[in-house]
Image: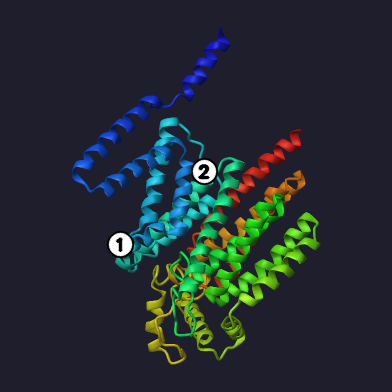
Amino acid sequence: MADKLEQNTTLEEERPIIEFPSLVKLIIVSGALFVGLSLLILPWYLALAIFFALGGMIAVFFDPYMGLIAFLIGALLHPLEFFSEVFASMHVSTVLAVAVMFIWAFHIIVYRDFKIVNDKLNILVIIFGIALFFSTLEYFDFSFPQFVDFVKLFILYFLVVNLVRTRNKFLIMMWGLVVLGAIACLIGIFQHYRGIGVDYGEGVIRIRGTALDPNDYAMHIVILVPMVFALLFNYKNLIIRGLLLLILILLILNIVFTYSRGGMVAFGLVLGLSIMGFSFQRKKLILPILLLAVGASVLLPMIPEKYWERAKTISDFSDPAIQARLDTWKTGLGMIADHPVRGVGLGAFRYEYTMRAYMGSDVKTRASLFSHNAYLQIGAELGVPALIIFVLLIVFSWIDLLKAEKLFLKKGDLLFAGLSLSLRLGLLGFIVSAVFLTQAFLTMFWIILPLAVVAKIFAREDAGKYASA
């Protein structure tokens, strides 16, 4: 009798606040009524859009993880921009992030699913967000819209940390990132052969894929390269391996067609370490060398001569672009020295640089320039405290991924050990790229951070089960 009473009590505690069948019926009836009425007032395509939006909201309520995947598609591919220029000026991905967050919150309330992941990285992200907000106070009207752009990354971090709760969801997300990268690369190849891209007066058209800037796009691709290696080394199916090799070739070609020098340096380092790291992890040295030889023989003839010409200018300090970067770095350090606590204001680097360039005599490049260094960008715009937090985010993520990899290897889980290594190498790619490029708020970077937390949690859970077995 006592056991039955305890079982009933447990079932009562697990029952949602609102009965699920009644809730679903209410949402479906209300949604159908709304769509039906919209057909009388709105054009058919808007009514159809409303129908799919409501259907999507119901699907996300069933499983908020589906909303996270939809958000990733929107944040990485920006698909609506291809249909109308109006969407390009709207914060569509931010709106989608907020919508998914609220639906997830509603799901939590209804199901009493108050299992929120607690980790030191969460605290650092919150502190960084607060520092970011305070940096908008100097030029609030100008800086606040850029803070709104960061909000989607803030939401993305906490969605990934709390919604990727199973190994399958982790694996699906890794595959999803690779597939989205492949789609972006196909768009990039189309842009290259159609002459679509950005011309900075250097005699080449630089593709930007689904990003706003060629350098931004190159950083995304560099991070994806080790993920492809991780999957390639852990799947034996020949069809899957063939597709992954094709994706790897697409990634390499897209990096070439961005003509990003910072991307070149980071890619070369990440590619070499990926081959070495996965070879030693799996104790297979011959296969990677063969793949490298075959890949080089296929790809080298496809690389334009202008790419090699641009690569040679990396160490040429007389090159105007290199001189401009040196000027921005020197001026950026001056901004940090003059505004060490709160910085010059979020997004204000290029305007502060222009003012200092025309007022000072030691700056040769007098134009509106970005920092071309993510660390200087954070330090100059947000202040030294925010820069310290930013570096700590990178350091703790690196440590978490290294610990996760070792625990997975100890258990013999080569797949997740490889995925942890790939995320760490992707993080290294960002660390190196960030020395030459401005993107401190790169979407892929803010995906790696929460995945590091999730990988560590899975590794510790598996280690606990392994120890108790």
Above or below for 6 versus 324: above
Above or below for 68 versus 396: above
Picture residue at 45% right of the left edge, 76% below the top: 195
Above or below for 434 versus 357: above
Label 1 secondary element: helix
- Mark 1 neighbour class, 10 Å CA radius: few under 14, some 14 to 19, many 20 or more: few
Picture residue at 54% right of the left edge, 77% below the top: 259
Residue 170 in sight here: yes
Say which label, 1 or 2, has the lower sequence index.
Answer: 1
Above or below for 469 versus 280: above
- Residue with the mark numbered 1: 86
* Residue 251 rendering spot, x and y as whole percentages: 58, 65
Closest to the observer, 413 or 247: 247
The amino acid beneath tag 2 is Asn
Task: Give the image quarter of residue 86.
Answer: bottom left
The amino acid beneath tag 1 is Val
Picture residue at 57% right of the left edge, 46% below the top: 172
Closest to the observer, 402 or 100: 100
- Mark 2 neighbour class, 10 Å CA radius: few under 14, some 14 to 19, many 20 or more: some
Picture residue at 38% right of the left edge, 82% below the top: 354
Left-right relation of 311 to 17: right
Which circle, 1 or 2, is nearer the viewer?
1
Task: Give the image quarter of residue 229.
Answer: bottom right
Closest to the observer, 188 or 279: 188
Residue 384 in sight here: no
Q: Quadrant of the N terminus?
A: top right
- Residue with the mark numbered 2: 162
Left-right relation of 279 to 49: right
What is the CA distance from the residue labelled 1 to the residue labelled 2?
Answer: 33 Å
